[in-house]
Image: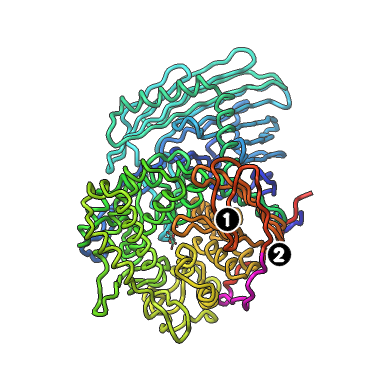
Amino acid sequence: MTAARQLPGYEVAPWELRWRWLDLDALRKTESTFALSNGHIGFRGSFEEGEPRGLPGTYLNGFYERRPLPYAEAGYGYPEDGQTVVNVTDGKIIRLLVEDEPVDMRYGSAPNHERVLDFRSGTLRRHTEWISPTGRQVRITSERLVSFTQRAIGAIHYEVEPLDGPAQLVVQSELLANEPIERETDDPRVAAVLENALVSDFHTGAEYHAALAHHTRRSGLRMAAAMDHEIDAPGDVWTENHTSDDLGRLTVAAEVPRGQKLRLTKYVAYGWSSQRSTQALLSQVNAALAGARLSGWQGLLDEQRAFLDDFWDSADVEIDGDAELQQAVRFALFHVLQAGARGETRAIPAKGLTGPGYDGHAFWDTETFVLPLLTYTVPDAARNALQWRHSTLDKARKRAVQLGQAGAAFPWRSINGEECSGYWPAGTAAFHVNADVADATARYLAATGDKEFEAQYGLELLVETARLWSSLGHHDAHGRFRIDGVTGPDEYTAIVDNNTYTNLMAQRNLREAATRCEMRPELARELGVDEEETARWRDAADRMVVPWDDMLQVHPQSEGFTRHAYWDFAGTPPENYPLLLHYPYFDLYRKQVIKQADLVLAMWLRGDAFTPEQKARNVAYYEPLTVRDSSLSSCIQAVLNAEVGHLELAYDYFAEAALADLHDLYHNVHQGLHIASLAGSWIVAVAGFGGMRDHGGKLTFAPRLPPELGRIAFRMCFAGSRICVTIRRDEVTYQLVRGEPVHTSHHGEAIALKEGEPVTLPIPPAPQHVPPRQPAGRAPARRRPYPVPS
Ligand code: BGC
């Protein structure tokens, strides 16, 4: 490894993320990258000792506090309340004293210290040798997990060994509520920090067990956390149990000879509810603890491993030729799994449960970026996320009524399903989120054939979103269907007429709803849909305006976009990015400058609506305008650049998407990971270099590798079958790993995959076009392949 490569601090390895040095300045970011979660509970990767710490955080998916959304000038339909994820009772804390001296890594020295996030065991391991300021030496090893199989459970196995002679060790294992956290207010995207959000309802402790119950002041949600322990030490131990409103503490003291160990296994259980009583929640967490105790630490480890073996079996992506990207893509898959695995009808927030960024809100990121990955790898998790959307339908219907529309208007950003965006041009007007929900629903239905989901949830999601489009748009004097005054994915262009992405996605939404209603007429009738309504949807879809600039021979991102003045990229200094923090929106809105893939995104999701020539011309037109001030862009630019033949550029964007958090490219990883960008790295591998498309529910492939990579192999599920695609320089092999035959195509040639009959085909040469430029200073870093470390 070169010295430069060592800077980020993570070692390159295929199945783990290891950080070998003590670097207190890096704590806040490694707390995000080392976060553990199962989609229900999230533990940031802070040290057991509680201090030093960066931005400690423990989150429960869906558990939030309301906060006022102040407006300088009020307006009709503005959301009155915001929602902020709460840092709940911290159950990770295990403080340690060695002969009276608190172990605090700010003092003394740590000749050996490393932490390892293991993607196969699903645990965070730590190994520290610490020398106290007075010279006492101990070795601390810990391993922790948030269980994928026992959803309410986190657990830590903690060991201390004196290295220089016998030592009196005192361990204090805590549940700590209302832990103070620091403020960061200069960036509008940063979470509002709520102090003392939790009000104590109850505390109890006896022997090795303690429990605390709290509620939030304004949102009225209740939660309980409980802990239990197993202790193993040579000789006698002295223990004390103490609880108060915001603290549960088990203290354990032991005299430990050199070379022997004090071992503590801590089980922590969490539960929350808007309905259930404190007593019921306490019973629930105690029951969960009993289950975890029954499994024991080894049992939890074994279950975690088995769960992840199954995941990797259906989701792994192998990359030859760039060891760091291999690691980054597995890191990404692991964290996306963590974000969505056990959410169970809760949202998947933009940061997962890894940090407080974006107030813990979920956006369209889930449906458009995360669900393609989950649909084809862990379809049950995709189903759960869509069920969450469905559970918020009543709120979305109310919002549509408030906005004077029919059907349902899903929120731009939310925790509980109510709109929380206080900036309506980017929030409320971004109606495309509804088509994104419909698109994810249609994809899930086509990929799984899940009839029960269709009947209970899917059809209603398609119908209510189709109704929204039907009322939001109108037929003009020429009979064309227009959707005016909306904001597309590019937040540097707002309130536009006929955003091409929105219109094409709405078109698919309307057609999909009509087709599914025609296939299930009884269900459609129950939803009040008749033939007249489906005919209206089809008519709107058929007459949908799709803007076209005849002179430039490209699709304008929205009507009139290509007539706007160009942004002065050459005169924009690098430190003025992201532009939204340095220029007024009014100026961004009236110029040709694009925050993130918009028309280019349409060419991925609605690739069936563009010819290959149009795609190539559109890519050439939009690349020089797109500044990528959002992490949701590089992955999509990679996909389209790969499709039109710019494979090296696609590889650069691939690295940018996959390394967004490991290289902290947006300088805010301490606020949590960019889950959409992480999922985007899977999108690049599978849809970019694998050329996978699923238009109209048909699975097709058109693979091509960038010259830097020797092989990409990925697995995915389709219609209950598992397939593996192995792409090499000149040929690709499709293999049905198990299940019913799959009908697909390779660069347009139909193929049928059957068990035991792999199909190997040559890869045609890529189309040749002049490589596009990017705005001055905004080209992605040229990716140099990272060799396998020796
Ligand atoms: C992007 C949105 C995205 C949000 C959350 C914003 O910067 O423009 O498209 O949904 O971040 O990731």
The response on whether ligand 1 sits within 8 Å of label 2 is no
The amino acid type, in three-letter code, at marker 1 is: Val
Q: Residue at x 48, y 48 (%)?
A: 375
Q: Residue at x 63, y 13 (%)?
A: 235
Q: Residue at x 63, y 36 (%)?
A: 126
Residue 319 shows up from this direction? yes
In the image shown, does 186 or 645 lie closer to the viewer? 645
Question: In terms of secondary structure, where does tag 2 sit?
Answer: loop
In the image shown, does 731 or 276 lie closer to the viewer? 731
- Residue 686 is tagged as 1
Span shown in magenta: 764-777
Q: Quadrant of ligand 1?
A: bottom left
Residue 624 shows up from this direction? no
The amino acid type, in three-letter code, at marker 2 is: Pro
Q: Give the side of residue 73 with respect to residue 655, left or right.
A: left
Where does the image place residue 562, in percent across and percent down from the top left? 43, 81
Residue 196 shown in magenta: no
The residue that label 2 is drawn on is: 707
Where does the image place residue 649, in percent across and percent down from the top left? 63, 68
Q: In 3D space, how far apart are the residues under numbered discs 2 and 1 (Cα atoms)?
A: 17 Å
Coloring scheme used: rainbow
Residue 774 shown in magenta: yes
Q: Give the side of residue 399 with respect to residue 341, left or right.
A: left
